Image (cartoon, rainbow, N blue to C red):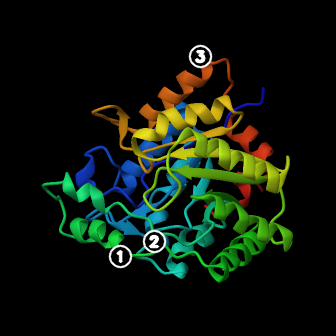
């Protein structure tokens, strides 16, 4: 049985400050929670930046530089920098953080889609910051843009320009075929690291049979030249990633993906989710991959090749 890679997505750009008091917003808190998650067993840390003044999604490399060096110095975890950013950002803004540090790994979204969280407004009564309501409501009419030209730019500027390898985020089956198109053109070489994303409104639903279907199509398209992981959104996080591990996959947790630890219980930190899934995996007899083992499995360029 191969070792399981745990990815932790520390803050993201979807959840807003009013949704949880435990969501890390400042560089100090992002670094604290990322380091704790790595110590708990996360081999890969998926990272976004936030404006330290009001917690809104940010892209300025100077903000990344307030927490990435500290994480890099305190852990040997793989730093996986977003290129998804937020739906309000341009592609140039979304690439800024990863390009600035010549990232070892970056996320790459494999197609345009509706990416909606506006239904949560039915439950939210109070907001810490004025921007939150409009940001959430904006997902009703916005499109998360990832055109073929956009993706080509990401491959050219990061993949070819910096030797960055990617976590390919696939929110539906068509995204797998988009990736196969780029593989056939020779723009991407294995091993591919797929992140199946289930449960986001606008993407494939969180049904267990959908995970089986995504895996079957990935086998058809990529044979044995890929690694894979699962992101289960919201309350579907732990059931879906446990299913993924039983199917031979890797797992992703973190407050970007779910603010909860269980029904009606907010997670107090990213590390709490890491410790929970690690306990599940080890109870099932699985071993947890170290950062260096993850680097070998994914053929990353190494932590000494980034600019921090």
Residue 266 x %, y %:
30, 36
- In this figure, which residue is indicated by the disc labeled 2? 59
| Label of residue 283 in the image | 3
Q: Which residue is at a point 74% across and 69% down the rendered structure image?
A: 159
Quadrant location of the C terminus? Answer: bottom right
Q: Name which of mark 1 and mark 3 comes first in the sequence.
A: 1
Q: Quadrant of residue 252?
A: top right
Residue 188 versus residue 56: which sits nearer the camera? 188
Which callout, 2 or 3, points to the residue nearer the camera? 3
Q: Which residue is at a point 41% across and 51% down the rendered structure image?
A: 30
User: Badge 3 local density, few (<14 within 10 Å), some, or many (20+)?
Assistant: few
| Label of residue 141 in the image | 1
Mark 3: which secondary structure?
helix
Residue 147 versus residue 193: which sits nearer the camera? 147
Q: Visible in this render: residue 103?
A: no
Mark 2: which secondary structure?
loop
* CA separation in Å, label 2 and label 3: 39 Å
Quadrant location of the N terminus? Answer: top right
User: Badge 2 local density, few (<14 within 10 Å), some, or many (20+)?
Assistant: many
Residue 216 x %, y %:
74, 46
Q: Visible in this render: residue 170?
A: yes
Q: Which residue is at a point 22% across and 66% down the rendered structure image?
A: 133
């Amino acid at each position: 049985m191969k070792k399981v890679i745990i990815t932790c997505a520390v803050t993201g750009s979807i959840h807003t400050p009013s949704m949880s008091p435990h969501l890390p917003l400042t560089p100090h808190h992002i670094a604290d929670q990322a380091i704790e998650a790595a110590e708990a067993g996360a081999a890969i840390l998926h990272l976004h930046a936030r404006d330290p003044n009001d917690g809104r999604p940010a892209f300025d490399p100077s903000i990344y530089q307030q927490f990435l060096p500290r994480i890099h110095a305190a852990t040997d975890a793989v730093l996986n920098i977003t290129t998804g950013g937020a739906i309000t950002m341009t592609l140039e803004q979304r690439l800024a953080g990863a390009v600035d540090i010549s990232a070892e790994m970056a996320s790459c979204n494999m197609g345009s889609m509706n990416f909606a969280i506006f239904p949560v407004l039915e439950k939210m009564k109070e907001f810490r910051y004025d921007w939150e309501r409009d940001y959430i409501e904006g997902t009703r009419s916005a499109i998360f843009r990832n055109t073929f030209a956009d993706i080509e730019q990401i491959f050219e500027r990061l993949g070819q320009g910096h030797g960055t390898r990617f976590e390919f985020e696939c929110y539906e089956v068509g995204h797998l075929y988009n990736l196969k198109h780029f593989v056939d053109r020779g723009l991407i070489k294995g091993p591919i690291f797929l992140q199946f994303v289930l449960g986001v409104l606008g993407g494939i639903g969180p049904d267990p049979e959908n995970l089986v279907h995504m895996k079957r199509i990935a086998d058809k398209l990529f044979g044995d030249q890929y690694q894979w992981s699962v992101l289960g959104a919201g309350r579907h996080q732990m059931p879906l990633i446990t299913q993924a591990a039983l199917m031979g996959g890797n797992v992703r947790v973190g407050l970007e993906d779910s603010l909860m630890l269980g029904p009606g219980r907010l997670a107090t930190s990213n590390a709490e989710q890491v410790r929970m899934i690690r306990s599940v995996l080890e109870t099932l007899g699985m071993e947890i991959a170290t950062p260096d083992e993850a680097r070998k499995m994914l053929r990353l360029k190494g932590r000494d090749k980034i600019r921090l």
